[in-house]
Image (cartoon, rainbow, N blue to C red):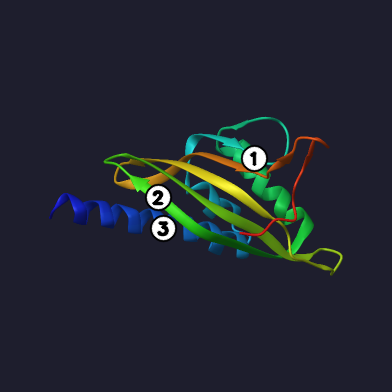
Amino acid sequence: MTTYEMDETDEAQIRRQIDEIIDRLRDKDLEGLKVLYTSDVVSFDVEPPLQHVGIEAKARNWANVFVFFETVTYEIRDLTLVVGDDVAFGHAFARLSGTLKNGSATSGMWVRVTYGLRKIDGTWLIAHDQVSVPLDITSGKGVIDLEP
């Protein structure tokens, strides 16, 4: 197998892992989400604090989604990856939407997401993610009405 074919296979595995986030959120499968991350994952998510360290902290972020949403839709667009032998990074746009517990539908907002991945025992896991929205410097507020 050439290096190119190995990279392509690794990229395909990473894309499947990222797709699993979509499926497991839809299924509200918190335990299934946890296995997609390293145990020491560091997450810079949109909600405070500045960082969430460890799989339990990351899981609490996803668990909060399930508190507010009756049905969950997660969309990832324009995923771009750079893959090495055992480290990879990627970036994309993502949107969390669905039906809230009160029955109202929400289209959510587009955010920017960056992934840092490590290949551990042959499996690609998310070791770092960062989710953000652009900042309007004048007002000091996040800009949440942009679309890719």
Query: From mark 3 to mark 1, how far is it between C-alphas?
Result: 20 Å
Q: CA distance from mark 3 to mark 2?
A: 9 Å
Residue 43 x, y percent position in the rendering: 58, 37
In the rendered image, which residue does mark 1 sit on? 45
* Eye-nearest disc, 2 or 1: 2
- Pinpoint residue 23: horizontal percent, then vertical percent: 54, 64
Q: Residue at x 81, y 35 (%)?
A: 138
Q: At x 75% / y 60%, what residue is drawn?
A: 69
Q: Position of residue 102 (x, y in %)?
A: 87, 65
Where is mark 2, residue-wise? 81
Dot 3: what SS?
helix
The answer to whether any part of residue 83 appears in the image is: yes
Residue 11, by quadrant, is: bottom left
The residue that appears at 70% across and 62% down in the rendered structure is 97
Q: Hey, what amino acid is under mark 2?
A: Leu
Q: Residue at x 39, y 53 (%)?
A: 14
40 vs 14, nearest the viewer: 14
- Image height check: is 123 above or below 147? above
Dot 3 and dot 2 residues touching (CB under 8 Å): yes
- Tell me the residue that label 3 is attached to: 15
How crowded pointer 1 is (Cα within 10 Å; few <14, some 14-19, many 20+) is rated as some
Is residue 145 rendered to the left or right of residue 94? right
Left or right of 69: which side holds 6?
A: left
